[in-house]
Image (tube, rainbow, N blue to C red):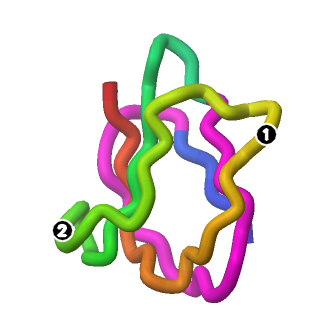
Amino acid sequence: MVYNFYRYGTYNVSNLVGDYTVVNCQTGGAGIKGFTGRDGTGKVAWDLDINNCNSGLWTSLTSTNSVRVYA
């Protein structure tokens, strides 16, 4: 399953079980965070505050239920 986010905000995600490569190709210094709860609540599961379009972050997304794109 692939999700693409093009605007700042919080997005609920589902059915992310196991390990995935998370890539932040946002421009203008935007970052992305994964949260354990819906609607950006709960603990921060991972945080990519830099553009890592060339490498990605290999991580388990099983506990990720929402993603926030932030400035």
Q: Amino acid at mark 2?
A: Thr
Does residue 69 appear left or right of residue 59 in this picture? left
Q: CA distance from mark 1 to mark 2?
A: 27 Å
Q: Quadrant of residue 21?
A: bottom right
Q: 7 or 44: nearer the eye?
A: 44
The magenta stretch spans residue 19: yes
- Quadrant location of the N terminus in the rendered image: bottom right
The crowd level at tag 1 (other Cα within 10 Å; few <14, some 14-19, many 20+) is: few
Q: Amino acid at mark 1?
A: Ser
The crowd level at tag 2 (other Cα within 10 Å; few <14, some 14-19, many 20+) is: some
In the image, residue 4 lies at what x, y percent? 62, 48
In the image, residue 37 lies at what x, y percent? 26, 76
Query: Which residue, given by chain and number where applicable, does mark 1 sit on?
Result: 55
The magenta stretch spans residue 9: yes
Write the start and end of the magenta stretch as one range: 6-25
- Quadrant location of the C terminus in the rendered image: top left
Which residue is pictured at 70% across the width and 61% down the height? 58
Quick one: SS at disc 1? loop
Which residue is pictured at 54% across the width and 44% down the height? 5
